[in-house]
Image (spheres, rainbow, N blue to C red):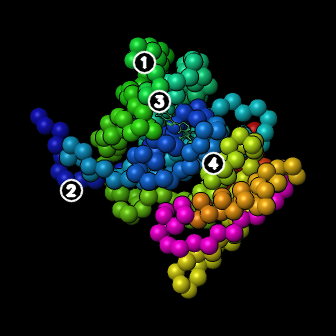
Amino acid sequence: MSEEKQPQTTQFGFVSVIGAPNAGKSTLMNQMVGAKISIVSPKAQTTRTRVMGITINDFAGHHTQIAFVDTPGIFKPKKRRLDKAIVAAAWEGVIDSDAILFIVDTSLKSPLHWNEDILEGLRSQNLGKKKVTLVLNKVDMINPEKLFKISAGFNDVFDFDATFMISAEKDRGVEDVLNHYTKLLPEGPFMYPEDEMTDMPSRLMAAEITREQVFRKLHDELPYNMAVDTEEWEERADGSVEVSQVIYVTRDAHKPIVLGKGGQKIKAMGKAARLEMEQIFDRPFHVKLFVKVREQWDEDPEHYRIWGLDPNQK
Ligand SMILES: Nc1nc2c(ncn2[C@@H]2O[C@H](COP(=O)(O)OP(=O)(O)OP(=O)(O)O)[C@@H](O)[C@H]2O)c(=O)[nH]1
Ligand SMILES: [Mg+2]
């Protein structure tokens, strides 16, 4: 019997992408969607909210729209309110999804140990019939022997429906993961227009683009404790967009770091962000950036509201 199905039948589902901070969740989602939807950086805890990347794929007679939900990295939050909200948002993604993609950074010294919290969490969540797929990432950095040991270690402690070994960054093995979900997801109508790639509002997307440029231009000079909000978004008659954004830092001493000598740094960030926005939104942009010190931006209820996070996580 062949697995071929009628091409008219469509399939649709949400796949939540979970993993420890820095595992490569956003890199993989962007790769599968074929567009830069979620920002990526070498710093842990880059993604702070749920970001959806939508794609349509055809494989073995299946015609499927897949909505990947990139989540913030899951870790054990200690005290900070923002950390608790971030981790809660990640687990919420799991509960709402049809299937779970669990991605692991295999280049770490002890990946299994590093992921204990998540495995524990997966065991305690009511997953019903949801399948959990193991995706071993960054295989470009380790040898096959170690990789197979890691794979066996994870499969010993949890019942995964399949295991993939990939390099999200080098685009190796990514298509197999995409095809897996193309077959797996339930039959049903597409939930999003065929050309839609994300459900993220443009203002938030623009803020994320700038936040990535701040990471890039400052490397390790700035702690990760920084936020960007889009204050104004104005569509001009000529088709261009004027955007004003504020980069929030928590200390006076951080302000000159962001500005750079004679404002060089912030100028460069603004330019890079503008080019990226023009590419993503396919229209001209004018970007104005400001730096403000707000010691407790991560306690400001407005910030939580904008980003769809719940400030009252226990
Ligand atoms: N060598 C290698 N690096 C990778 C691979 N995939 C991702 N990375 C790098 O790992 C770092 C983290 O990638 P992200 O995609 O931001 O990871 P994330 O899981 O979304 O991280 P958070 O949002 O902070 O939880 C970045 O520097 C990526 O370039 C891979 O396959 N190989
Ligand atoms: Mg991320």
Say what amino acid the circle numbered 1 marks.
Answer: Asn
Identify the mark at residue 143; answer none if there is no mark.
Answer: 1
Determine the image quadrant of residue 110.
Answer: top right
Distance, label 2 to label 1, CA atoms, is: 43 Å
- Circles 2 and 1, Cβ within 8 Å, touching? The answer is no
Q: Is residue 172 left or right of residue 96?
A: left
Residue type highlighted by circle 3: Lys
Relative depth, front residue between 8 and 171: 171
Residue under the image location 13 percent in, 37 percent down:
2
Expressed as whole percent of the image width and height from the top left, the position of residue 150 reads 46, 17
Q: Is mark 1 within 8 Å of ligand 1?
A: no
Dot placed on the residue nearer the N-terminal end, 2 or 1: 2
Looking at the rendered image, the disc whose residue lies closer to the viewer, 3 or 2, is: 3
Q: Is residue 191 above or below residue 14?
A: below
Disc 3 target residue? 138
Residue that mark 2 sits on = 8
Q: Which numbered disc, 2 or 1, marks the residue closer to the eye?
A: 1
Identified at 17% across, 38% down, the residue is: 3
